[in-house]
Amino acid sequence: MTPLRRVDSAPPCTSPSPLCRVRAAPGKESTPSVARSAKADDNARPTFNRPANSDEMVQRVTLRTRKSYNTSSNLRRIIKTPGGKLSYLRLHKQATAPKCGDCHTGLPGVPALRPVRYATVSKRIKTVQRPYGGSRCGNCVRDRIVRAFLVEEAKIVKKVLKSQAVPTKSKK
């Protein structure tokens, strides 16, 4: 391996990578720089110092299925098998929890399942025992009930005021 020397015209290396060599002249502050081979000319691209184990091959990953495309329905992660090989483990799509139609927060008590699974589970799992059970959250249902009550009260007050205003008319 050829010895490395510091090149003053090279821009300083700002990355925290161990590939950049830090050398300092005696009595000067150490600054990172790009190291070059001693026999390389000044116009050549800089060569970084590689770690000692960079010549090793990476371990191969075994596909279990015949579908190798990286699609949204073919998610996978790498696992190590008991034999020491790397293999892909197929992941399922993440299910999203149902959300309240008014405030768009997740509905507590209703599990997040994929649509096919919702078709197979019973109704009591998909809802909560309350009016608007699997559709609206408890706070929004309470607001609806209070709003309906206040609207009905306003109608009654309007009717009473109208009935009090009618007898003031005089008959001829």
Image (cartoon, helix red, strand yellow):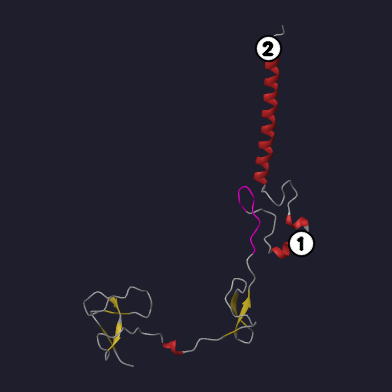
Q: Residue at x 73, y 56 (%)?
A: 126
Residue 147 at x, y = what percent?
66, 36
Q: Which residue is mark 2?
A: 168
Q: Amino acid at mark 1?
A: Val
Residue closer to the observer: 169 or 44 = 169
Query: Tag 1, which secondary structure?
Result: loop
Residue 171: give x, y in percent of width and height: 72, 8
Q: Is residue 54 above or below residue 100?
A: below
Question: Which x, y percent locates residue 63?
Answer: 61, 83
55 relative to 165 in the view: left or right:
left
**N-terminal-most mark, 1 or 2:** 1
Q: What secondary structure predominates along the stretch shown in magenta?
A: loop
Amino acid type, label 2: Thr
User: Which residue range is magenta in the image?
Assistant: 95-105
Position in image of residue 110 (x %, y %): 70, 56
Give the crowd class for mark 1: few <14, some 14-19, many >=20 residues within 10 Å.
Answer: few
Q: Pointer 2: residues within 10 angstroms few (<14), some, or many (20+)?
A: few
Closer-to-camera residue (49/136): 136
- Residue at 78% x, 59% y is 122
Residue denoted by label 1? 121
Q: Is residue 64 left or right of residue 34?
A: right
Image quadrant where one finds the C terminus: top right
Q: Which picture quadrant has residue 142? A: top right
User: Image quarter for residue 143?
Assistant: top right
